[in-house]
């Protein structure tokens, strides 16, 4: 790992960091000098990702968290502060998805997606906000989706959660600016590894990009000067038909 300095001395929490976009973001942050806490539910995946980062010369640790559970999120932030003294960057990346026609969507499936993608981001951001207000600085980056712009058919829960996440981002960005807290959102298109894992052939018809590419943009957002907020970025394969067909 070639060590950079864009995030030197920063303490970052990345949720859903065991695989995919989350792991790529944690790796990119560590390569630029951040001490990264990889958070998620699967301890083995978190440990593997953290070990790769440390073996390459970066600073990383892993902590289990269920972002849908208030006490679990509180414990994550308490332990991070105990170890590092502060939190400078939070990336809300943990996510879940389900598909199916609206009239066949169960309440349990709906609730799982909303709880993970939206309530989880709220719970983590709430704890981060308290710390960052006291610090008078901080950055929260939410990983949304192009589904917050153009939903797919059969994705009511996922689309609603990402639209909601965009609304949460806007509200927190307004609230945070008086305290030096920048809140932003990235809206990725089809990405591997990620929700398209196992369905690559279907996604390739539209276009696919790698998680490391998304992470490069998140790093740019995180490395902005403290008085600047790159509020939103949409990144997608050139061939992905988000912008219209024909």
Image: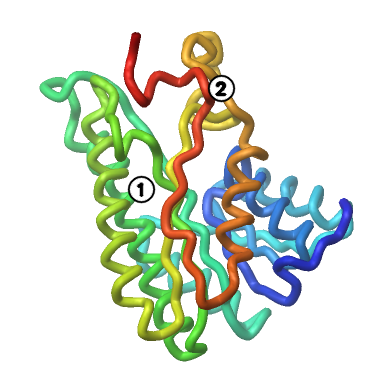
User: In the shown orientation, is residue 12 left or right of residue 196?
Assistant: right
Number of disc labels? 2
The image position of residue 36, as x and y in percent, is 68, 64
Q: Quadrant of residue 194?
A: top right
For label 2, the residue is 208
Q: Residue furthest left?
A: 103
For label 1, the residue is 117
User: In the shown orientation, is residue 215 left or right of residue 61?
Assistant: left
The image position of residue 199, as x and y in percent, is 50, 15
Q: Quadrant of residue 32?
A: bottom right
Q: Is residue 79 visible?
A: no
Q: 209 or 99, which lies in front?
A: 209
Q: Residue at x 47, y 82 (%)?
A: 132
Q: Residue at x 30, y 42 (%)?
A: 112
Task: Say above or below: 227 vs 188.
Answer: below
Task: Say above or below: 181 vs 102.
Answer: below
Q: Are marks 2 and 1 in contact (CB under 8 Å)?
A: no
């Amino acid at each position: 790992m070639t060590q950079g300095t864009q995030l030197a001395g920063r303490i970052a929490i990345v949720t859903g960091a065991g695989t995919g976009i989350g792991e790529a973001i944690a790796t990119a942050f560590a390569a630029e000098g951040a001490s990264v806490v990889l958070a998620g539910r699967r301890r083995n995946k978190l440990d593997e990702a953290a070990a790769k980062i440390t073996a390459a010369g970066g600073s990383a640790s892993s902590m289990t968290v269920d972002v849908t559970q208030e006490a679990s999120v509180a414990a994550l932030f308490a332990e991070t502060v105990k170890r590092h003294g502060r939190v400078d960057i939070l990336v809300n990346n943990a996510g879940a998805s389900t598909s199916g026609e609206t009239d066949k969507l169960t309440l349990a499936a709906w609730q799982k997606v909303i709880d993970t993608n939206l309530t989880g981001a709220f719970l983590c951001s709430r704890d981060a906000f308290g710390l960052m207000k006291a610090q008078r600085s901080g950055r929260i980056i939410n990983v949304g989706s192009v589904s917050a712009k153009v939903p797919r058919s059969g994705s009511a829960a996922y689309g609603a959660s990402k639209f909601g996440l965009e609304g949460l981002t806007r509200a927190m960005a307004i609230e945070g600016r008086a305290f030096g807290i920048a809140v932003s959102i990235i809206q990725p298109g089809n990405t591997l590894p990620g929700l398209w894992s196992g369905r690559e052939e279907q996604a390739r018809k539209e276009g696919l990009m790698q998680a490391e590419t998304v992470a490069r943009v998140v790093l740019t957002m995180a490395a902005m000067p403290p008085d600047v907020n790159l509020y939103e970025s949409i990144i997608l394969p050139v061939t992905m038909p988000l912008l219209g067909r024909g």
